[in-house]
Image: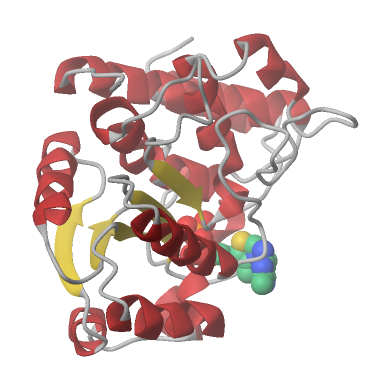
């Protein structure tokens, strides 16, 4: 089944998700706001418009899979899984507390989570392994993997760029949250890649570009990605780290900083109030 929201509904929901991220991270004084806020529309479009999933049957055999390579963006993943009904929303109150199922990075204790991630880079290789298994089983499911652009600096993703192409993994779609900022600076200063499009095409991937905050465009590019045959697809989604909260936007300082009371109040105000 598909959760099926239209663009207007999902736009409103995304704004609420941003407030939920801010509130949850403020109340627990922990977590990663910047990279969660940049991935809101990417993950929401996948979960609410595209993926074949059943929250009542998380292990459904022919489900589509989502691997969050940038596992530190767990807050938005948890908020979406709770909204879909994979687990009660009340669990969100235990975010990153001792014995909670909702730790700072995704684990198998969370219904709906398909892979344990956190160490950057390994998500894509796990996704490629899953995609291979699904093909062997002749299961018509897609594997989506969302990675960060700082994460591109992990060598293991480049191994997967080679192998996924060799094995013609057209059931694997990697979405890059291209916000240009990593933990402590700009990606272009720390480890630039001159022409990512050309590099990935050279690896044999189909490369598509999209505004990662435009739900209509995301929906359409995902349809295109799903129609490509014979090779894996790489979607470069241009995003803004900290999107929606002016003083967090483009700021590596807000990668993983606790949200103090004043910043919380200002952020919620900017997002339209409680
Ligand atoms: C292997 C590994 N090295 C370092 C880290 C610490 N770390 C967590 S997030 C992060 C920056 C990630 O940047 P990016 O992929 O661009 O994420 P985003 O900006 O989208 O949040 C780093 C270095 C890690 N989780 N894993």
Which residue: 39% across, 37% down?
40
Q: Residue 259's image quarter? A: top right
Q: Residue 209's image quarter? A: bottom left
Q: In front here: 58 or 154?
A: 58
Q: Is residue 139 above or below residue 91?
A: below
Q: In front here: 163 or 146?
A: 163
Q: Where is residue 226 drawn, in percent x and y?
A: 16, 51
Drawn side of residue 249 relative to residue 138, left or right: right
Drawn side of residue 102 relative to residue 188, left or right: right
Does residue 154 appear anywhere in the picture? no
Please tell me in which quarter of the rendered image ligand 1 is found. Answer: bottom right
Q: In front here: 1 or 11?
A: 1
Q: Where is residue 213 drawn, in percent x and y?
A: 25, 42
Q: Where is residue 239 drawn, in percent x and y?
A: 31, 53
Q: Which residue occupies the extreme right position in the image?
A: 98
Which residue: 51% across, 81% down?
153
Q: Where is residue 47 drawn, in percent x and y?
A: 35, 31
Q: Is residue 241 above or below residue 61?
A: below
Does residue 238 appear anywhere in the picture? yes
């Amino acid at each position: 089944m598909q959760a099926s929201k239209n663009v207007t509904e999902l736009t409103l929901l995304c704004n609420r998700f941003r407030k939920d991220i801010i509130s949850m991270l403020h109340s627990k004084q922990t977590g990663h706001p910047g990279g969660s806020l940049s991935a809101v529309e990417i993950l929401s479009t996948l979960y609410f418009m595209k993926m074949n999933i059943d929250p009542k049957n998380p292990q459904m055999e022919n489900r589509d899979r989502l691997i969050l390579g940038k596992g530190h963006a767990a807050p938005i993943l948890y908020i979406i899984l709770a909204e879909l009904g994979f687990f009660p929303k009340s669990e969100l109150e235990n975010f990153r507390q001792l014995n909670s199922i909702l730790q700072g990075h995704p684990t198998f204790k969370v219904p709906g989570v398909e892979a344990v991630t956190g160490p950057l880079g390994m998500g894509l290789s796990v996704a490629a392994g899953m995609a291979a298994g699904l093909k062997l089983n002749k299961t018509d499911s897609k594997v989506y993997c969302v990675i960060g652009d700082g994460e591109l600096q992990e060598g293991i993703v480049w191994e997967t760029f080679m192998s996924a192409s060799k094995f013609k993994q057209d059931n694997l779609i990697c979405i890059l949250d291209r916000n240009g900022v990593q933990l402590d600076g700009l990606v272009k200063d720390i480890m630039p890649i001159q022409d990512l499009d050309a590099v990935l095409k050279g690896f044999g991937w189909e490369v598509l570009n999209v505004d990662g905050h435009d739900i209509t465009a995301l929906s359409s590019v995902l349809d295109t990605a799903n129609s490509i045959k014979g090779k894996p697809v790489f979607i470069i989604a241009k995003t803004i780290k900290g999107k929606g909260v002016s003083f967090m936007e483009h700021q590596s300082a807000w990668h993983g900083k606790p949200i103090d009371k004043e910043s919380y109040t200002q952020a919620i105000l900017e997002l339209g109030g409680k």
